[in-house]
Image (cartoon, helix red, strand yellow):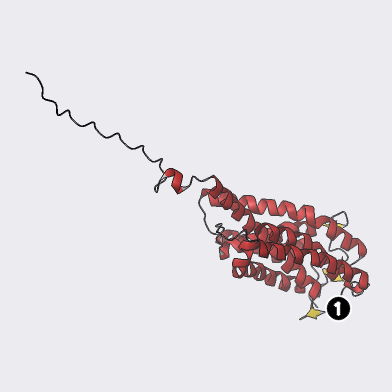
Amino acid sequence: MLPTLTYLQFHLVFSLPVVAALWYLAPRYGAVRRRRATVGIAILVAIAYVYTTPWISYMIRRGAWSYADGAVLVRALSIPLGEYLFFAIQTVVTGFALHLIGFDPTFREGDFDRAPRVAGVVAGVAMVVGGLWLVTLDPSYLYLGGLIAWVGPVFALQWAVGGGYLIRTPRMWLAATLIPAAYFWVADRIAIAMGTWRLSPELTSGIAVLGLPIEEMLFFASAGVMTVNGLVLFEWVLDWNDRRGRPTESSTGAFGREPEPDSPEPEPESLDPVDD
C-alpha cells in the first residue's frame, strides 16, 4: 500500500512541479497580451474562490468526501488549506496549459449569432434542473447531481456571452480542458489509493473508471472547461471592445489616416489682353 501523504505534501509532489514546469514553458507574449493573460488568470482564480468555496464547504459538511487522519492541518469553513490551494493551482495549471496550446481570441462576424448562445443557456438551465433532480432522487447522487447543478449557471452564462465563438473553436477549448484534467485524474487516483482523501460510498454513484469515481472525473473536467472558457472569453471580449473603438477604414482612409481635403483647383489664368 502506498504511504499516505498530507494534503500539503501532495501539492509538493504533484502540483507545484507542474506549475513550475508550465510557467517555464509558457509562451513569451508581448506586453499587451502578457498583461491580459495575467489579469485573466488572476480574475479566474478570484472567481474560483468565490464560487467554489460555498459548494465545496457544503459537500464536505454533508460527508461527500473526507480526509485521512493527519492529512489536514488547517481548516476554514470545513475546507482544508490544501483544498483552498487547489482552487488556485488547478486554475493556474489550466491557464498555463491553455496558453501553451495557444488560442486566437479574435472576434469575428457571427460570434454573436443567437442560436448557439440560446442553446447554451438552455443547456445550462437543464443542467441545474437535472442536477437538483438527481440530488432528490437518491442520496447516492448527492455529489454527481450537486456537481451538475453547480456547473450549470456558469455554463449558461459563458455560452450566453460567447456561444458563437465557443461553437467555432471546440478543438481548442476541449484540448485545453482535457489535457490538464487527465493529469489531475491520475494524481487524484493516486491520492485516493494512498488514502489522503476518500469518497463516501453512500453519497456517490459507485461508478468508476480504473478506480477513479466518475464524480471526480467530471469535477476536474468541469472545473477545467469553466476555467478555459472564462479565459478565452475574457480576451475575446477585450478584442471585441478594441474593435468597437477602432476607427473604421471608411472614416480614416485605407492606411488609418484622415483623408486629406481635396486641394482647390487653381484658377485659370485670365485670357484678357494686358494693356501695355
Please identify the quarter of the rendering in which residue 136 is found.
Answer: bottom right
Query: In x, y percent, where is residue 32?
Result: 53, 48
Residue at the spot x=84%, y=59% of the render? 55
Query: In x, y percent, where is residue 13?
Result: 70, 66
Q: Which residue is mark 1?
A: 206
Rendered-image quadrant of the N terminus? bottom right
Position of residue 52 relative to residue 138, above or below, is above
**Mark 1, secondary structure of its residue:** loop
Is residue 197 rendered to the left or right of residue 33? right
Residue at the spot x=88%, y=69% of the render? 133
Residue that extends furthest to the bottom in the rendered view of this protein: 210
Query: In x, y percent, where is residue 168?
Result: 59, 66
Is residue 234 rendered to the left or right of residue 30? right
Query: In x, y percent, where is residue 50?
Result: 78, 52
Residue 81 visible? The answer is: no
Q: Amino acid at mark 1?
A: Gly
